[in-house]
Image: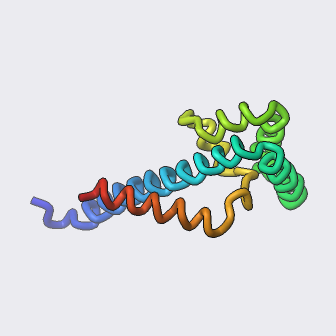
Amino acid sequence: MLAGHEEYVTEALRGERAGFVAHIVQAQRDAENRVVAGKLAQDPDRVLARARRNLERFQAIHAGATVVRWLDEWQGIIAQGPEAVMRTLTSEAPHAADLRQNSPFAGVLSESERRDVLESFTRHWERRAT
């Protein structure tokens, strides 16, 4: 029945796998963003100061690029205060997810904290798979 159509089946399976991998990567980023949101709740001045410094640096690096639109939007959200940032970091809205692809929160989590989040996330997904 599939004779001569193996490449189509392989391509379809590859597409499904890519979609699943993208879903896992997004879920992993969401987990990291929730931890960043926790840090924001604990020390909003430090977290927002880091984000502002990152935004200044990113805007200089990417001047004139399309990414500046997202950076400008982050700047406006940060100007609204910690509550607006918290909503954006934890929102399931597609626009918020798109915005987080250009997150100014690099460096808020230490490498050790990032590793802990990723290990916890991996354990969670491994348990779900069994």
Up-down relation of residue 68 to residue 108 (above or below): above
Q: How many labels does the image show?
A: 0
Residue 64 in view of the camera: no
Q: In which quarter of the image is the N terminus?
A: bottom left
Looking at the picture, the colour scheme in use is rainbow
Residue at image position (54%, 48%) is: 30
Q: Position of residue 53 (x, y in %)?
A: 87, 54
Q: Position of residue 20 (x, y in %)?
A: 38, 55
Pick whichever, 47 or 52, lies toward us.
Answer: 47
Residue 14 relative to residue 32: left or right: left
Residue at image position (28%, 61%) is: 8
Residue 94 relative to residue 13: left or right: right
Up-down relation of residue 104 to residue 126 (above or below): above
Residue 45 in view of the camera: yes
Q: Where is residue 70 in the image (x, y as percent from the top left)?
A: 75, 44
Up-down relation of residue 114 to residue 100 (above or below): below
Residue at image position (56%, 33%) is: 93
Q: Quadrant of the C terminus?
A: bottom left
Residue at image position (59%, 39%) is: 90
Residue found farthest to the left: 1
Dividing the picture into quadrants, the one containing residue 6 is bottom left
Pick whichever, 86 or 24, lies toward us.
Answer: 86
Up-down relation of residue 13 to residue 79 (above or below): below
Q: Position of residue 23 (x, y in %)?
A: 44, 51
Residue 47 relative to residue 99: left or right: right
Pick whichever, 96 or 117, lies toward us.
Answer: 117
